[in-house]
Image: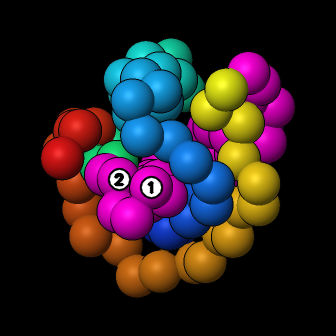
Amino acid sequence: MNLHYQIILKGNFQQSGFRFHALQAAHDCSIRGQVTERNGNIIIDAEGDEQDLGKFLKWCYSSKGTAAPESIVVVKKPLAYYNEFLIL
């Protein structure tokens, strides 16, 4: 069963390359959706099966270095039926 999570990572991600790393992780975890930066925070819309989303969320929570999030909020949303994962 596919699910859609909006993942909000709060912190300072400007110039960190985090969106590119999120794209790589999404591909590794078979996640579709999009990632964008807004006001220095990262907004990820992720769709996939429960197991793949679990792997992707684990990656989000384990990110380290200068792009480590201060906090993460995960909200379940209706499916948007993404075909791929994009950086916006």
The residue indicated by pointer 2 is 37
Circles 1 and 2, Cβ within 8 Å, touching? The answer is yes
The disc labelled 2 sits on which kind of residue? Glu
Q: Distance between the residues labelled 1 and 2?
A: 6 Å
Residue 40 numbered mark, or none: 1
Q: Give the image quarter of residue 58.
A: top right
Residue 3 lies, in percent from the top left, at 52, 64
User: Relative to residue 57, is residue 66 depicted above or below?
Assistant: above
Q: In the picture provided, is 19 more to the left or to the right than 29?
A: left
Is 40 contained in the magenta span?
yes
Q: Is disc 2 surrounded by few (<14), some (14 to 19) or many (20+) residues within 10 Å?
A: some
Q: Nearer the viewer, mark 1 or mark 2?
A: 1
Q: Is disc 1 surrounded by few (<14), some (14 to 19) or many (20+) residues within 10 Å?
A: some
User: Is residue 45 among what the camera can see?
Assistant: no
Residue at 62% across, 32% down? 67
Q: In the picture provided, is 55 more to the left or to the right than 80?
A: right
Residue at 72% across, 61% down? 72
Residue 49 lies, in percent from the top left, at 56, 49
Does dot 1 land on a helix, a strand or a loop?
Answer: loop
Residue at 50% across, 42% down? 13
Residues drawn in magenta: 36-65
